[in-house]
Amino acid sequence: MNKQKGETMHHYDPSSEIQDYLVFGEYGDVNPSITDSSTYTFLNPQIMNELFEHEIEGCFLYSRHWNPTNKYLAQALAKLEDSEAAIVTASGMAAISCAILQLCNAGDEIVSGRTIYGGTYAFFKNFLPKYGINVKFVNTQDLKAVKSAITEKTKVIYCEAVSNPLLEVADIPKLSQLANQHNIKLMVDNTFSPIIISPIHLGAHIVVHSLTKFINGTSDCVAGCVCGTHEFISQLTDINSGASMLLGPVLDSYRAASIMKNIHSLHIRMKKHGENAQYLAENFEKLGCKVFYPGLKSHNGHKLLKEIMNDGFGFGGMLAIDAGTTEKANEFMAKMQQEKVGYLAVSLGYFKTLFSSPGHSTSSEIPEEERKAMGLSEGLVRISIGLDNDIRKTFERIKKCLNEVGLCK
Ligand SMILES: *Cc1c(COP(=O)(O)O)cnc(C)c1O
C-alpha cells in the first residue's frame, strides 16, 4: 500500500480491504472452521521449548495466547484499520485497559480527552492511580491545552475519534504531530466511526474498538480489539510480560467467528446508519431542536470530519438531542419506546434505534462539574440510529413524540 502517515486519505476504502482478505478454511470453507480447543499439540518437545523462549510466528500454543479463529478476526480488523497487526479481546474495556497497562508504568502520565466513554473515564480516574499512573483530562479540541498538559512523564495521548456522547471530532493529524514531537503514542478509540475514519492513516499509533457496537452490530455479545504495530501487538501477547496474555481477557472463538461474519456487512450498515441519521438530524434541526450531529454544518466538528473522513460512508449513526432537563429527556425516551421508535437502552450500532440519557448512564462516572464544563447537559438524549428502511416514517413517529412532550418548539 502506498500511503503516507499523517496525510488525509479520501479514497481509502476499508471495506474493500476486508473484502480482499480471503480466508480458506480447512476444507476450503468460505467461513473457516471454528477452532474449538483451549490447547494445541506440539509435534515435538523441542518446538514447545522454543515457543516459550521466543514467539514462533503462526504457531499455536494455548487459546489465551492465540487461536486460529481469533487470529482470522484480528487480521480482518488489522485490514479495517490498515494496521500492521491486531489482537481481539473479550470487551472494549479489556482492549483499552490492556493497551494502556502495556504502555504505562508506575509514575507515567496520560493526557486524555475529557469527553470519553464513561467506563474509560472511570478506569483512568479511579483505577489507574492505584498503580501510580495519573491521567490529565483536557479538551482535546484545544491543542494548546493538550500541549501544555504533556510532561516528561507523559506516555500516551488518548482520545475518541468521534467522542461519546457529544460527537466531537478529534484532530488526529494535529494530535499525532504533537505525540511525535514528544516521542509518545497517540491512542484513538474509533468505536463510533469504524470505516468512516482511519486513524492510523491520519497518524495515530494505536487504535482500539469496542466491537460490541457497530462492528458486530447485532447487540449479541461484548468484544474489543487493539490495532497497532507488529511490535506492540507482540508485546501485548508476550507470554512473560504481555497485558492481554497475563490479564487474560480472551475472546471465545465462537464469538470471534460470529463477529467475523458480521464485519462483512459493516460498510453497508454504516452507510445506512449514516443516511438515516443525516435525514433525521436535518429534519430535527428544521423543527428547531438542539441537535448534535457531525453531518450538520452547525456541528463544531463538521468541517474537520469532512477533511479527515473516508468518502462514501456518511457521518455516522450517532446523534444527540438536548431535551433540556432530565425529566423532559425521560419523558421523550419513554414516548419513543412506546411509539416503537426503538429501545431505551445503552449501547449502539444495533439495527433498531437505541436511546439513552448519557448524563445518567454511560457518562454518569463523569463528575457534575466536569459534565457542565464540557457542555454535557443533563437532558441530553443520545440516539444510535437504526437501519430503518423508511426513515421518513420514523421521523414522523419521533416528531409526534417531540410534540407530545413539548420539545423543539
Ligand atoms: C462501549 C464503549 C467502550 C467499552 O466497550 P465494551 O465492549 O463495552 O467493553 C469503549 N469506548 C466506547 C466509545 C464505547 O462506546
Image (cartoon, rainbow, N blue to C red):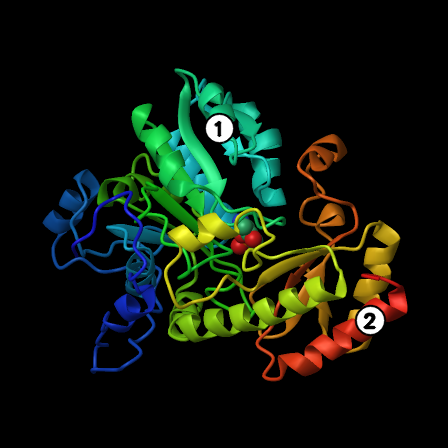
Disc number for residue 111: 1
- Quarter location, residue 237: top left
**Which corner quadrant holds the N terminus?**
bottom left
- On the image, numbered disc 2 is attached to which residue? 401
Indicate the position of residue 117 as horizontal and vertical percent values: 59, 45
- The residue lying toward the viewer, choosing from 299 and 318, is 299
Instruction: Name the residue: 31% across, 78% down.
Output: 31
**Element under label 2?**
helix
- Quarter location, residue 197: bottom left
Q: Judge depth for marks 2 and 1 and give the one in front.
A: 2
- Residue 391 visible in the picture: yes
Q: Earlier in the sequence, mark 2 or mark 1?
A: 1
Q: How many marks?
A: 2
> On the rendered structure, is 246 left or right of 366?
left
At label 1, the amino acid type is Val
- The residue lying toward the viewer, choosing from 94 and 369, is 369
- Residue 347 visible in the picture: no
**Which corner quadrant holds the C terminus?**
bottom right
